[in-house]
Image (cartoon, rainbow, N blue to C red):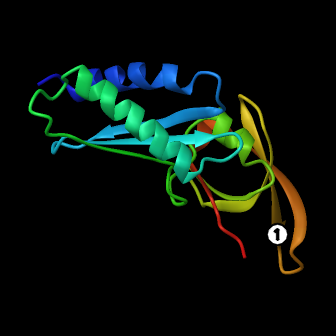
């Protein structure tokens, strides 16, 4: 059996033409030793279950036709990343400007605030500080960010 990286690359090659002309993009492809393939997608305009199901069917047939697993012993899940999954790329950062996020730096304390802007170099958060909860802007270099997770606020 091929290595996972090669298999993931092959699945990405099948998937990219299916995403052409849409605002859908890949955030992760993971393959478990049980041949369970998990494809996580996101879209600038949001990703609904119907789009996931359609892509799942098309991708499943491509994998089957390529006989990557000749016995057919694989499963495929196509979904959007869970709400607890970290953001992984610039498109996701841009899509979530205006939302509350928790930034975990490589060193130091987590910071939670409203994502105000993102560039290739840094992000800007609006945070509340002190007892009076005064609003403050903080800039964090992306090179010092371990992960960014969107927080669900009610």
For this rendering, which residue is in front, 14 or 111?
14
Residue that badge 1 annotates: 129
Secondary structure at numbered mark 1: strand
Count every numbered label the image shows and give the total: 1
Residue at image point 32% right, 34% down:
60
Q: Is residue 61 above or below residue 50?
A: above
Foreground residue, 137 or 37? Answer: 37
Q: Position of residue 14 (x, y in %)?
A: 39, 21
Q: Quadrant of residue 74?
A: top left
The quadrant holding residue 36 is: top left
Q: Give the quarter of the figure containing the N terminus.
A: top left
- For the question of whether residue 106 can be seen, the reply is no
Query: Residue 69: horizontal and vertical position, in percent?
Result: 15, 29
Residue at 58% across / 42% down in the picture?
Answer: 42
Residue 134 is situated, as x and y percent measured from the top left of the image, at: 90, 70
Q: Report the side of 78 relative to 137 (left or right).
A: left
The C terminus: image quadrant: bottom right
Residue 84 image offset from top left, x and y in percent: 51, 60
* Residue 154 vs residue 63, the one in the foreground: 63
Farthest bottom residue? 131
In this rendering, position of residue 130 left or right of residue 49? right
Q: Is residue 34 visible?
A: yes
Vertical position of residue 71 compared to residue 129: above or below: above
């Amino acid at each position: 059996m091929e290595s996972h990286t090669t298999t993931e690359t092959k699945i990405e090659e099948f998937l990219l033409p299916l995403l052409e002309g849409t605002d859908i993009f890949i955030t992760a492809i993971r393959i478990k030793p049980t041949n369970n393939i998990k494809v996580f997608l996101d879209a600038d305009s949001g990703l609904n279950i119907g789009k996931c199901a359609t892509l799942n069917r098309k991708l499943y047939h491509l994998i089957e036709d390529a006989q990557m697993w000749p016995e057919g012993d694989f499963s495929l899940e196509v979904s959007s990343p869970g709400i607890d999954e970290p953001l992984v790329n610039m498109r996701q950062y841009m899509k979530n400007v205006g939302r509350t996020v928790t930034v975990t730096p490589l060193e130091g304390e987590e910071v939670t605030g409203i994502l105000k802007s993102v560039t290739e170099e840094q992000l800007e958060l609006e945070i509340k500080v002190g007892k009076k909860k005064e609003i403050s802007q903080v800039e964090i270099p992306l090179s010092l960010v371990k992960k960014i997770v969107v927080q669900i606020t009610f």
